[in-house]
Amino acid sequence: MSSVELVPVTKGLQGVIEVPGDKSISHRSVIFASLSEGTSKITNFLTGEDCLRTVEVFRNFGVEIEREEDTLVVHGKGIASLKEPISPLNFGNSGTTARLMSGVLAGLPYFSTAYGDASLSKRPMDRVVMPLKEMGAEISGRQEASYLPLAFAGTTLTGKVHHMTIKSAQVKSALLLAGLLAEGTTTVIENGRTRNHTEMLLPQFGVEVSIEGSEIHIEGGQQPQASELRVPGDISSAAFFLTAAAITPDSELIIKNVGLNPTRNGVIQALELMGAEIEAVPHTYIGKEPVGDIKVSYSILNAITLEGDLIANLIDEIPIIALAATQAEGTTVVKDAKELRVKETDRVEAVAYNLNQLGAKVETREDGLVIHGPTPLHGGEVDSYGDHRIGMMGAIASLISTAPVTIKDKDCINISYPNFFDHLYQVL
């Protein structure tokens, strides 16, 4: 297990960087392109380990996918041309691959099995499996198919109306993909707004999706068509540098070409509520996705309460927002974030443990965190628990610590941000 020691900085962060492609959009783009007829070109594709798992899944289905650095060329031949995989599909640590591909595997007329690493095998799959079974899917596995590994018999699905009981873009996307492969119309009714990349991107691949308020409708039997797509920068990756500049004195950073989808910009909203000096304006669109540059400078921050619909918009950014809260005046409260406990690790416990190890004052709640600030950080050891976002949180904490911070299992950061340390050293 690899470790890295990071020393405190003696000056502010300065410079311009461009973060890797959006993880959520990268996953979806290769799924849609692989199901399409024709050759698709995807540039600025995130080459982290998670997204490459999705690439390998479709190679197992016989799809020819060429990769040169961060560009993919996907030679799709249509849904009917996919071939039954002869070996189990390895989802690795990728929850997005597991959830979204479950919708695809359930609707294809092939037998397939899928598994993940030890961490992914502990993450709940019943939230996807149960509604897919209501469409006629035959899925088996341990504890009534609540966890990986899973086996998919490959059956004819029937479209139905799904009333979402949890706020999850992964579940929503799995059901829409299953609906694409099903007979009839599938409707997903959300109980709160979640990231909408699936319904934004499908039309770019020639699939009609109807949206009426909280209802999303897709007609089965449509054949996606090839498209060209440049993936915008990942705002979840940008969040670490936004926070770094906001909490490190004398800092000013510009992060270029970041996706500014309104269902993903919760980290910007949270930092603004805390008083951060931050400016984000879209300057172009990639398909229907707004893209722009973000400028952020050091600011005195104030405590806030994060709860309700905003939580779904920034669930992946809560670890780094928690670090910001350790430097804010007052007590920050994070509520309605129970979903954090079933991520790559239990992020409620992982965030609290590691920040407390560094000198912060953080309490856990069943659905979130209470962070008392401002507190100086005295350095120490951060255990990433194999979770990329915990590892990056620890790295940013080193910037304001009074002594070095050691990150255990730094290689897990490659899951979403392979050149994270290059960018960090670039702006120091």
Image: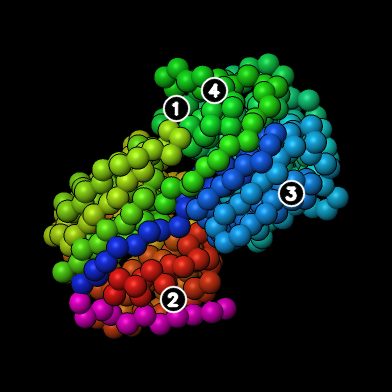
Near-viewer residue (131 or 49): 49
Query: Which residue is located at x 66 percent, y 41 percent?
Result: 39
**Where residue 191 is drawn, which disc sits there?**
1
Distance from disc 4 to disc 2, alpha carbons, whole Å, reads 44 Å
**Decide: marks 1, 2 in contact (CB < 8 A)?**
no
- N-terminal-most mark, 1 or 4: 1
Magenta stretch mostly in which secondary structure? loop
How far apart marks 1 and 2 lie (CA) works out to 38 Å
Mark 2: few/some/many CA within 10 Å (<14, 14-19, 20+): many
Give residue 308's position: percent from left, percent from top: 34, 37
Q: Which mark is residue 209?
A: 4
Looking at the rendered image, the disc whose residue lies closer to the viewer, 4 or 2, is: 4
Residue type at mark 2: give it: Ile
Magenta region: 1-11
Disc 4: CA contacts within 10 A as few (<14), some (14-19) or many (>=20): some
Residue 407 tag number: 2
Query: Could you tell me if the residues under marks 3 and 2 are in contact, i.e. CB atoms within 8 Å?
Result: no
Residue 53 located left or right of residue 288: right
Task: Please say whether residue 83 is visible from this viewpoint.
Answer: yes
Decide if residue 384 is on the left or right side of residue 361: right
The mark nearer the N terminus, 4 or 2, is 4
Q: Position of residue 351 (x, y in %)?
A: 39, 62
Farthest residue to the right: give it. Answer: 86
Q: Which residue is mark 3?
A: 64
Mark 4 is on which residue type?
Val
